[in-house]
Image (cartoon, rainbow, N blue to C red):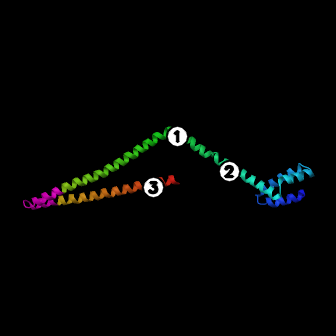
Amino acid sequence: MTREEYMTQLKKHLRKLPSEDYEDAVDYFNEYFNETDAEGEQKLMKELGSPKKAAADLISNLLDKKIQEESEIKKTPSRSTLRIAVLALLAAPVAGPLLAALLAVLLATAITVLSVIFCIFVFAFCVLIIGSKLLLRGIVAIPYSIPGGCMILGTGVFGIGAAILLCLLGIYLSKWIGLLFVKIVQHFTRKRGN
């Protein structure tokens, strides 16, 4: 087999490569053959093996080289990652106390809201007791003074109604704050998951 025939068959098998790699491979083999004489060409063709084998070896080497380059690229951190790391290190002395302060404010807010809701229920219970007492006093006072008894009775009924409304307000506030807390937790867990 002559050099021209070998190169023709080799080019046919190298067509699978991208155009830039194809041209580089053909140039490589041409330079390899140009460095030897006619006798050296025959030896070279025996060393390389068939054109199909030579092409397969070259393609395999190129793939190995590209895989190695890609893994090295993935191993080296990008500049943005380095910048974030440096900013995190520089912000650490400031971020720690700020985070602690933020957590303290959030805890104080939660305690305040829970205290307000607790106070609403306590106030509703007190108004219910006062309303019940006034209702009983109004019933007892009716035989002595009908207008006075009716006024005390009406005040007692008003107190019981206000206590019921305060209980409903406390229940709705508790439900709304619970839903708000769940949505906030879902929002933060969804962000970390992305």
In this figure, which residue is indicated by the disc labeled 1?
91
74 w.r.t. 147: above or below: above
56 w.r.t. 92: above or below: below
Q: Residues within 10 Å of mark 2 (few under 14, many from 20)?
A: few
Q: Secondary structure at mark 3?
A: helix
Residue at 27% x, 59% y: name it: 165
Q: Secondary structure at mark 1?
A: helix
Quarter of the rendering occupied by the N terminus: bottom right
Q: Which residues are magenta?
A: 132-153
Q: Secondary structure at mark 2?
A: helix
Q: Report the residue that reaches farthest toward the top.
A: 93
Residue 27 seen in the figure: no
Badge nearest the viewer, 2 or 1: 2
Please state which of residues 175 and 75 is positioned toward the viewer in this rendering: 75
Residue 165 seen in the figure: yes
Say which amino acid is labelled 1: Ala
Badge nearest the viewer, 3 or 2: 2
Say which amino acid is labelled 2: Glu
In terms of secondary structure, what is the magenta stretch mainly?
helix
